Image: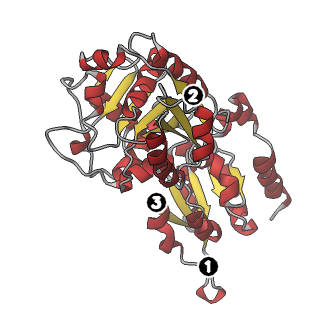
Amino acid sequence: MTTRTTRIARTAQAAPSDRALEGGDRGRGRLPLVVTSDDQLLDEVLRVAAAGGTEVDVAADPAAARGRYGTAPLVLVGVDQAQASLRARLPRRADVVIVAPDRLDEATGSPDPWNFVEPLGATHVATLPAAQLWLVERFANSQLRGAPGRVVAVLSGRGGAGGSVLAAGLAVTAASLRHRVLLVDADPLGGGLDLVLGWEDDRGLRWPELAGTSGRLDGAALVGALPGRGELAVLSFDRRVPAEVAPEAMTAVLDAGRHTRDLVVVDVPRQLHPAAVVALQTADDGLLVVPAEVRAATAAARVATAAREHCSQLRLVVRGPSPGGLTAEEISRSLGLPVAGSLRPELGLPAALEGGLAPTETGRGPLAALCRRLVDELSAPVGAVSQ
């Protein structure tokens, strides 16, 4: 590489740019991410990025990319790292481009980039320098988006553990604190999150109208079409019309939510259908709700094993009371997961929910207190949540 582009690449890898410094760590997430260890390919990408008016964040391999992969406005995966990225099970997301040099030659054993488009969820293959004008425009457009929001997935360790209530409580609490929130129902058999909120009669789109969606969604238009109050919008299933949500639809919704909302909360079922797997892979954080009971903890072990394959940042919320004195620390050791918080009994909560009052709507009680603390953590930059 030339001296100039070598210096630019090293800056992108080792130190934040002036633009990134303005927003701290979260500002750094606004830079497009390039995953490659091919120096010649990186040299070409850097020239194109400069023409598009942006610097880039560089990762030599998927391990180095993982912490930034979900939050970057645009991801370019070099064909040299495509197979490794597939093995690393990086989360599915929109705006992924596989980039390859025109000099690819089957005689050299170089992989065909088109073989990785569907497995990686990529939208395009760009060969350089032939596609440089198209890629210049993509780089320029990537800078029009704001700082990405955080995605958190909530699961129940067993039936009736309270995952949907916690998901709704987090969303309601975050909205009351003036965060822009999207609550996404990923459980087709859960009865509908609009019902948990007491919004079942509110007009707006439900999953049946979006289940077959693919590609990019206009986030502002999506949020405006959903049932919403204040800073909170919800995408729920419709109890009258069954819908099977395609993985591509979940990807499109979560990407739109990440780029237009401060926080996206997803209620994920224990039985992981393909769209639920996408939600876990996309999530920056996962919360597993487990009652402090031996049978519940035993059932939660299987859920935790399945979920951890797709979401490495999985933590426990332990719900009391414990009939046999089982502690949160004992459940943590048993499942091998850190504790995000414990939830004391709230005697009036079931009656409030039956009466149509949304979880944490009053701002009082153990659930509201836990949700406020969790929202504070989830509002921190990605990667900054304490373990």
User: In the image, what residue type sits under mark 1?
Assistant: Leu
Q: Earlier in the sequence, mark 1 or mark 3?
A: 1
User: In the image, what residue type sits under mark 3?
Assistant: Gly
For residue 80, above or below residue 291 = below
Measured as percent of width and height from the top left, residue 135 is found at: 55, 56
Q: Quadrant of the C terminus?
A: top right
Mark yes or no: residue 348 visible. Answer: yes
On the image, which quarter does residue 100 sit in? bottom right
User: In the image, what residue type sits under mark 2?
Assistant: Gly
5 sits to left or right of 230: right
Count numbered badges in the picture: 3
Q: Residue furthest bottom?
A: 107
x 63%, y 89%: residue:
107
For disc 3, the neighbor class at 10 Å (few under 14, some 14 to 19, many from 20) is: some
For residue 167, above or below residue 56 = above
Which residue is disc 1 drawn over?
Answer: 104
Q: Earlier in the sequence, mark 1 or mark 2?
A: 1
- Distance CA(mark 1)–CA(mark 3): 22 Å
- The answer to whether the residues at label 3 and label 2 have Cβ atoms under 8 Å apart is no
Measured as percent of width and height from the top left, residue 301 is found at: 50, 49
Which residue is disc 3 drawn over?
Answer: 121
Q: Residue furthest left?
A: 240
For residue 77, above or below residue 112 = above
x 47%, y 52%: residue:
302
On the image, which quarter does residue 239 sit in? top left
338 sits to left or right of 251: right
Q: Nearer the viewer, residue 57 or 322?
A: 322
Q: Nearer the viewer, mark 3 or mark 2?
A: 2
Which residue is disc 2 drawn over?
Answer: 341
Report the disc number at residue 20.
none
Q: Secondary structure at mark 2?
A: strand
- Distance CA(mark 3)–CA(mark 2): 34 Å
